[in-house]
Image (cartoon, helix red, strand yellow):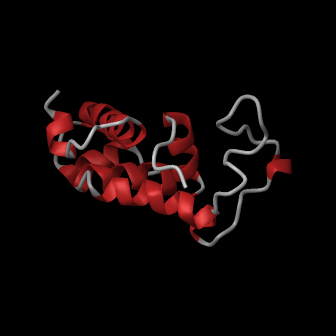
Amino acid sequence: MPDNYSRQTVEWVLEHLLELRQGIWPDPESGESYPTGHSRQPHAPFETPAGMAGVVEQKLKATGLVGLMTKIHFVMGESDRDLAAIARCPVGAIPGRIDKVLRYISGKPKGRSYQEFRRH
């Protein structure tokens, strides 16, 4: 199972996290666009839905509170305003924090912790 996904795939996994955790691939006939442009499948044939979700969730845990906020944003659709209230930060800071988490998860941090990645 790959341990590195594109940003688009990470966002797709987060949007479908509840289904994937249960071992269910979202219905490809729903008309929804998937993160890969050349295939209707967002995953390799050997991947399991729960495994794909697990890789993303494991990386999210390494990012702490901001990772949890990112998950809440994608899974529950929570607004930036509500997330800012929880994090006690300006509303305008939320998109940048979520972006940094997504870049960390989808990138190749080369052994760097999220805290090290954040500084660069």
Tell me where residue 24 appears, x and y as whole percent: 69, 66
Question: Residue shown at 71%/29% (left/top)?
Answer: 37
On screen, residue 78 versus residue 23, left or right, reads: left
Tell me where residue 59 appears, x and y as whole percent: 35, 53
- Looking at the rendered image, the quarter that the C terminus falls into is top left
Report the residue that reaches farthest toward the bottom. 22
Residue 50 vertical placement versus 63 (above, below) = below
Q: How many marks?
A: 0
In which image quadrant can residue 79 be found? top left
| In front of the other: 88 or 62 | 62
Report the residue that reaches farthest toward the right. 29
On screen, residue 85 versus residue 22, left or right, reads: left
Residue 118 vertical placement versus 4 (above, below) = above
Question: Residue shown at 24%/44% (left/top)?
Answer: 111
Residue 79 vertical placement versus 117 (above, below) = below
Tell me where residue 67 appears, x and y as whole percent: 31, 51
| In front of the other: 81 or 14 | 14
On screen, residue 103 versus residue 74, left or right, reads: left
Question: Residue shown at 43%/49% (left/top)?
Answer: 73
On screen, residue 7 versus residue 42, left or right, reads: left
In which image quadrant can residue 23 be found? bottom right
- Looking at the rendered image, the quarter that the N terminus falls into is bottom right
| In front of the other: 89 or 106 | 106
Tell me where residue 105 appears, x and y as whole percent: 38, 43
